[in-house]
Image (cartoon, coloured by chain):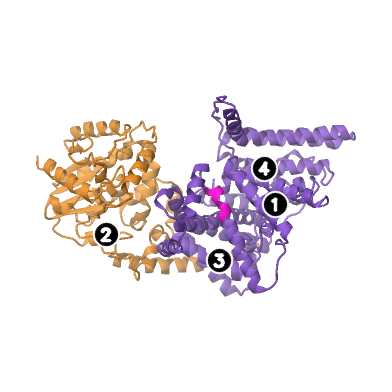
Amino acid sequence: MTKKIIYRLLIVIILIVVTDKVVGHYLDGLYKKNRCDFSNGKLNVFLEEDNVDTIIVGSSRVLHTIKPNILGKGVKTLAFQHKHIYHNAVIIDLLKQEQKLPRKVLIFNIEMEDLYIQYEPRLLEQLYSLKYYYSKNGLAKELINRKGYQESLKFLSSVYRHNGEGWKLIAYPRTNLCSPVSETGYVPLIPNANDSARLSRSLIDDFKPYNFKKINPKVIALLEGIINTCDEMNIDLIFINAPYFKYHPEFIYASNYMKKFCREKNVRYVDFNEELITGLEQPEMWYDNMHLNDNGANIYTKYLKSKLTE
Amino acid sequence: MLFNSVDFILFFALVFVFYWVIPNKFRWLLLLVSSYFFYMSWEPIYILLILFSTSIDYFLCRYLTASNNSRNRKIGLGLSVIMNLGLLFTFKYYHFFQEIMASILNLVNVNYQIRESSFLLPVGISFYTFQTLSYSIDVYRKDYRFEKHFGKFALFVSYFPQLIAGPIERASNLLFQLNKKEVKLKYEDFKDGALLFVWGLFKKVVVADNIRILADHYIDYSQFQNGGSIIFALLAFTVQIYADFSGYSDMAIGSSRMLGIKLSLNFRTPYFSQNITEFWRRWHITLSFWLRDYVFIPLGGSRLSKIATLRNLFITFFLAGIWHGASWNFLIWGCLHGIIVVIEKITGWNKNVNHRFFSFLKIVFTFGIITMTMLPVRSTDLIHLSDLLQLISNFHFKDFYLTVAENIYTPGAIGIAVLFLTDLFLAKRSILDIHKFNSIFKYSWVTVIIILILFIGDSSSEAFFYFQF
């Protein structure tokens, strides 16, 4: 009986392993070819770019709120929705690995919640779109493995490298969902009638108490890594914290910590929530509590430019 | 430790190997230790609740078995019922009870402050209390003999594959099998068990978890939606809850089958029912039968007058609603199903038709009713429910079509397509029907399912929806 079970199990396992390798290889090919604005097509496009002087890295609060063309030529945004420090630290490491770091300036937007230890599970979840780089980038592997020993077992499968957003590689290309990557990396939030309702709702949602207290040393270590990379490559590094319509009081402690940390490391840090940016006090400039719409992005980017040239 | 986690697969692999290696007489002990370990992986302290419930039921059943005095026997049963329902009330219903009290007292201008409970709802409490309750009643009725072996009885209460979310087993099925003298590893059991487990995992991580993202997106941010997108989200939620719960049941039955223990069938393609009465014979079957045997029939069942039968039906469904959750939403849901079943009984709609076209129409109509009655289950509170109803009242087919078109290329849609086609053509009664097909087809199907789990399965190990009950 046991023999029969083992024999049949072996057949199924061999069938699965072979299919997994074939499908995984096929998906790898699709991934590398992808130039649409999904499943890291944006990253593929970026890795082909030369002559980039300044890169702005961050989450949707960079993607929709900073207009690189206002900042000047050779400025690009490499920002991803719902992706924070862990994800973006891997992106920097990948750029370094592929020798695609900017020639002059790296602007890195920090989300204050990222600094708190309680937020770490969310940061780890955001790595799902970087599974392809698990075996290709040391930092990606190290961070993904922090989710637990189970992760290294899952990566025995080749298909699992594309778990997350990989299905779009098959489903999207022949549809109108394959939108091209924006040239500068900026994606506007066009003002619309829903903005004020959305802002009101987000003011309720965003102000639930986090009860965050402890700074995450692993995040600080990653920030130090980014600082060292920029030092090595002779790149000016600036950490920023993009503005909110209404700032969460629990972020103040983290921002103060950042200020102290950056002072010690001799790195520039600008918290735009401490600045008085004329125009941004109007609700019409906002998509929701944490994102500016296209009109607001104009005002903020101009202010950011003036700050950078100070 | 969720079934859809690597932790569980490793845990189960260990249990499986040791179970078949050690002599039969020690297997109950291995399963008991494994079950307690499994439960403690959720919240260690709540193992005390299971131990308490097990011990009290064991001694009360011993007492009522030993006694020939009918009054003493009734006292024994009464104490067991009070203890089991008392546990449920304390941990699950106390807060809701306070809410009702506060509403009533507010009507007479008395301010009642609801005291927040520091207890978390112990996972699976509704399932294992109903299981022990059925045992006490069966022993009282002499439908099942008292189990003298405390360890085996404790295992019956806490058997890990079905401890958290059923199927709700009877002693005549589960305890009987735990007492078998000789259990041998059979290829058929292993094959069926593994197939059920993989299919359940597919339903959970590919279908339920991916659809959840769509349903949550539209329902939780309903102020930016329209009637069409809310109907789409409700349809998505209806499939989600089926895939989630039946997926768990398949995994429970499958893992148990690999240990040579057959658990009861809990789902039989319920969305192909021709009426709500039939739906409840095919959805969460073990709960439906439990309510039939321990509520509906003791109330008089359908032996009394027509009015009394309808009353009994309504009470049974009202209790089914309340069993699911301690809130107004579930109470409304139970009442709605009760009213529909009563109407079906009066109009004769509860009888199935054989004509293909009319049966198809009845299935579509019933699915529509099931979907609409999911509204109170999915809404977060009564205000949210009324907001959603308002949006639905302004339904335009174009909005619905646009929402479908927006989501047609999502992993959830792929999952639904595979689930629907499999249920329609391969597994009319159970996924085990697939054995009728030749080996090449079977192996290919299993391979595709596993590749889909790896490729589009949600890897974040989301908890099962029914755990909250």
* Viewer can see residue B260: no
Q: Is residue B393 above or below residue B99?
A: below
How many residues crowd mark 4 within 10 Å: few (<14), some (14–19), many (20+)? many
Residue B263: image location, x then y, percent: 69, 54
Q: Are marks 4 and 2 on the same chain?
A: no
Quickly name the residue at label 3. Answer: B420
Side (left or right) of B148 relative to A300 = right
Highlighted magenta segment, given as a residue range: B372-378
* Mark 1: secondary structure: helix
Q: Are marks 3 and 1 on the same chain?
A: yes
- State if disc 2 and disc 1 touch (CB < 8 Å): no
| Residue B238 placement (x, y as % from top left) | 55, 56
Q: Say whether disc 3 or disc 4 marks the residue closer to the N-terminus.
A: 4
The chain that hosts pointer 3 is B
Q: Is residue A65 magenta?
A: no
Label 3 vs label 2, nearer the camera:
3
Is residue B372 among what the camera can see? yes
Query: Which residue type does callout 2 highlight?
Result: Lys
* Residue located 50% across and 42% down the image: B383
Choose mark 4 or mark 1, whichever is in front: 1
Q: Is residue B10 left or right of residue B284?
A: left
Residues at discs 3 and 2 in contact (Cβ within 8 Å): no
Near mark 2 (Cα within 10 A), the count class, few <14, some 14-19 or many ≥20, is many
Mark sitting earlier along the chain (4/1): 4
Mark number displayed over residue A42: 2
The residue shown at (54%, 48%) is B2
> Which residue is under mark 4?
B128
Label 4 and label 2: CA atoms lie apart by: 51 Å
Pointer 1 local density, CA inside 10 Å: few below 14, some 14–19, many at least 20 = some
